[in-house]
Amino acid sequence: MDASACCWKAWNKKMDRNVNVIRTIWMRREMLHNLVSRELKSRYKGSVLGFMWTILTPLFMAIIYVFFLRLLARGVPMEHIIIGVFAWQFTASSVNSGLTAITGNANLVKKVFFPRIILPTASTLAQLITYLFSLIVQLLLVAILLGIKGEHLSAWTLALPVLVAYHTLFNMALAYLLAAANVFFRDAQHLVGVLLTAWFFASPAMYDLSIVEKVAGTRPWLLDVYMLNPMAVIIGGYRALMLPDASVPWSIFTLIGLLIPLALFFIARISFRRLQRDFADLL
Amino acid sequence: MKSAITAQHLGKCYKVRGMAPPTLFGALKNTFCRKKTEPFWALKEVSFDIPKGKTVGVIGPNGSGKSSLLGLVTGTIFPTTGYVKTDGRISSLLELGAGFHPDLTGTENVYLNAAILGIPREDIRKRMDHIVAFSGLHDFMNMPVKHYSSGMYVRLGFAVAVEMNPDILLIDEVLAVGDIAFQLKCLDRIRDFQRKGKTLLFVSHALQTVEEFCDETFLIHHGDLVARGDPAEVILKYIRAYMGEGGYLYTQEFGTREVEFTQVRLLDDMNREAGSFESGKPMHVDIGYKTSQRIEKPVFGFSLKTGNGFYVFGSNTQIEHYDIPYIEGEGHIRLTINPLPLLQGNFFLSLSVHSWDHATQYHRREDWYPFGVKNTGETLGIFHINSQWSHG
């Protein structure tokens, strides 16, 4: 092993301490905590209602969706759409904030030595907190909508934290990948904007899995391919947990769709570690 | 003695891809067209070893690789060749206010910045009063830092950074900001670090400060560590080699060259060549010349300017009634300034030789010889004025 390879190992060790990302993050938890609160605080700084917006924004969004989707998507129950759209929002905003996690903190990355992985982690966690607040609003709305129909939230709703954690893991993986990619190719920002729109329609946010099943009636492989999309599994999962009448069509492909986020997380982690040493040079 | 910082064949190469940010299209173009990217070596094969408790100053012209060196030691930049090893906790004052968020208040930013630097929250809470007092921003701590002046920004950043209590402190020309009072406070804090046996590595263009604080000085030029050693010697070399003759200074040279200056040496009171002189002691300038023919009644002159171009003094042999009947071939003439009335700072010496009637300028070197002056007394200003007080 030559000296420079040895050096890289030592540098990586100093930078990240451990391949185990949880350990790295735990060691810099104070920094993480501060960065997350910086993101949240600065988002609402100067506004009269301040942190209230974390609840108000999803509430208004929900009202708008309920109002317009009532006109548009007659076939899909409103509570399905609310769950789908909010879950999608979490991923979309994580992707967008993850994209600029490194490039937007160029000054910090160029001048201070700290594990760079903290930055996309913090941006995703800030989105998670916003999502958790919107989840409260969402649960209330869904309970009311179900109540009108004389139904109740499923008991499985209690298992929601597990799915949220899984969803966050997926978003984190995307944030890591895109944060690193955007340093090398600024085109990523624009490309991702387009891809997000396509992905939105390819995910069951505005419609239901039952519609996909109906379309795929004659071609069963279509549903299989569809379920490879982790967002299909995640959004389907949210509905299955909260609503009494929804379920996820289980198959080997659903399982693969479920495993993709895990695999992606490890790929993202390893690529981030490999790419981070050039960050300061390119910013 | 154990070393705090060790570097072996440390090098950093940047691939200059023009000024545009990297794009996918650019990368594809490079892959397909095999367009050569110009490599730029910011630092080349530098090896050194800094023992614990030593203070090392890094000097050199702009763009010579000083900041790259500090970045490599901090770890923000990854070396292309070689390695650098550090022993102990590093804090660098090159990131003053780097993590500040404009919308957050001073207090919030102190916590944020401390967290980024890795200082435990509890420590900061305990030392908050001290930080506020040191920064002198008591009335502004609840104001978003976007309303701060750049000086206030740096003061707050410095106050946080020195709280980290590092083993190795890296400083990159940050003390130039802030007013005199704050600069003195900072220098005081740096002396404190030295007393506690910490290792300091600092980049500065304030040569006096470097000479005053450092045990050793590194001179970097075009990415090479061209000289290292005793601060006074290295500074002299820097001034001679890269600031003066053939250097980067805005210097001018003109004349008919019937008389030409050859070697010019600036000597201190012990007749040693020096780049920095003590105020109030004698300063000698040994001027060598050569002529192509016999020159009748030449006039040698000199003038002094401050580092920022303020004309301080000028005189010549004619004004001083030191008549030289003629010169021929090679020779020496000595100019003595005794005592040196300049107090503190960098100055430029210009030399000229012209004919008695001022009609012919034989040779003139404008701002050619820079030198520094150190103030050993307590008086302040650019130069010393003899003054007495009487009462009653």
Image: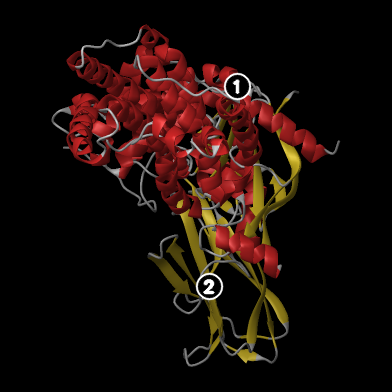
Query: What is the chain letter for disc 1?
Result: B
Q: How many marks?
A: 2
Q: Is residue A118 visible?
A: no
Q: Amino acid at mark 1?
A: Gly
Chain-order first, disc 2 or disc 1? 1
Disc number at residue B156?
A: none
Query: Are the residues flagged by discs 2 and 1 from a single subunit?
Result: yes
Residue found 85% across the figure and 39% down from its top = A2
Report the residue that reaches farthest toward the front.
A218
Colouring rule applied to residues: secondary structure
In the image, A235 versus A102, the foreground residue is A235
Q: Quadrant of the N terminus of chain A?
A: top right
Q: CA distance from mark 2 to mark 1?
A: 42 Å
In the image, A209 versus A79, the foreground residue is A209
**Image location of residue B356, percent across then percent down:** 50, 88
Q: Amino acid at mark 2?
A: Thr
Residue found 21% across the figure and 12% down from its top = A150
Q: According to the image, label 2 marks what residue?
A: B251
Relative to A197, say whether B26 is above or below: below
In the image, B145 versus B185, the foreground residue is B145
Relative to B205, say whether A54 is above or below: above
**Image location of residue B312, percent across then percent down:** 39, 64
Q: Quadrant of residue B188?
A: top left
Residue A190 located left or right of residue B297: left
**Image location of residue B279, percent across then percent down:** 48, 48
**Image location of residue B239, percent across then percent down:** 60, 58
Q: Callout 2: helix, strand or loop?
A: loop
Residue found 58% across the figure and 63% down from its top = B26
Report crowding for label 1: few under 14, some 14 to 19, many 20 or more residues within 10 A (C-alpha): some
Q: According to the image, label 1 marks what residue?
A: B197
In the image, B189 versus A270, the foreground residue is A270
Query: What is the chain letter for disc 2?
Result: B
